[in-house]
Amino acid sequence: MRTLDIGLAAHVAQGETTLATCWKLVRGDGVVLGFTDHDRTLNFGGVDFVPAHGLDGGEVPARLGAQVETSEVLGVLTAEAIAEDDILLGRYDGALVETWRVNWADVSQRVKLRSDTIGEIIREDNVFRAELRSAKQGLNATRGRIYQGLCDAVVGDARCGVDLADVAYRGFATVTAVDDDHRVVVAGLGGFEKGWFGFGSAEWTDGQRSGLRDGVVSHQRAADGDVLGFGVAVGQWVTVGDTLEVTAGCDRRFASCRDKFANAVNFRGFPHIPGSDFVLRHPRSGDALDGRAVVK
């Protein structure tokens, strides 16, 4: 049961209410937006909740147990509030949305109904429909570890221990050409080995993608510069002259951990575990079965 403060409880109990719904949206890049279904701007918590170009809430089901509760909000794509380009660029992916019930005549009387994250966003006829996923979504995350040859840490995290702020693992580049939607040619990485930034990441510091971080799946060297391949389509949002900071990646192999990062002591896999080729192996004439290790 949700507990209301004394003022809001008294207001609701009187029967005739002046209530409105407000949504506070916090993007991953720190941008905060406020919307309300009321006809004038409300302010609380240091956020202006504006009408007109905001959101319209849908049905909010309540479920027992650990099932993920989902709802949706509907809004108009406008340059002043939520621009279509920002949705296409992924700036709203995983954004936090707080839903508040507020007495618009006295905004100190309010209650937070729920906190959600934005899931799937559908765009149609200049309108967007955003799915809101409850905090129970986190319970769907995979927990535990499995025995495997590759490392299961994320390069640079606490379990890995590599300091990606080291200049040996960071480079600054400028786009000199766009090959296609997934590949761009850059200058400024000539001092690093070919492939050094494969499986890494890039944070755009200029242009339309400024502030966004994308995964780098490949790093090749060509006559006209270094070619970075991205896991998402970036070509239509990138132009010559855009800058980015690139961070070295790891293919999770023991050899890379040892030779590239000098971090073998923190390798979080099992490099000597037999693979499927060993499981399918059968005795053959001439095999050296003298008691020594078969898998090295």
Image (cartoon, rainbow, N blue to C red):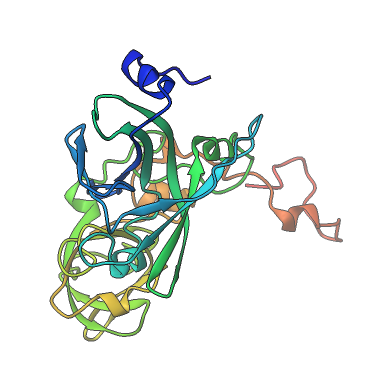
Q: Nearer the viewer, residue 113 or 212?
A: 113
Q: Does residue 39 appear to the left or right of 17 in the view shown?
A: left
Quadrant in which residue 187 is drawn: bottom left
Q: Position of residue 273 (x, y in %)?
A: 65, 44
- Is 82 situated above or below 219? above
Look at the image and tell me whether residue 142 can be seen: no
Q: Please give the name of the residue rendered at 22% of the width and 57% of the height, measured from the top-left corner.
A: 211
- Is 98 situated above or below 131? above
- Is 21 situated above or below 237? above
Q: Nearer the viewer, residue 100 or 253?
A: 100
Q: Nearer the viewer, residue 132 or 201?
A: 132
Q: Position of residue 164 (x, y in %)?
A: 26, 46
Q: Does residue 196 appear to the left or right of 119 in the view shown?
A: left
Q: Position of residue 69 (x, y in %)?
A: 57, 40
Look at the image and tell me whether residue 272 can be seen: yes
Q: Please give the name of the residue rendered at 35% of the width and 84% of the height, measured from the top-left corner.
A: 180
Q: Position of residue 139 (x, y in %)?
A: 57, 35
Quadrant in which residue 204 is drawn: bottom left
- Is 16 situated above or below 207? above
- Considering every residue shown, the one lying at the far top of the view is 6
Q: Nearer the viewer, residue 157 or 278?
A: 157
Q: Does residue 27 appear to the left or right of 72 in the view shown?
A: left
* Total numbered labels: 0
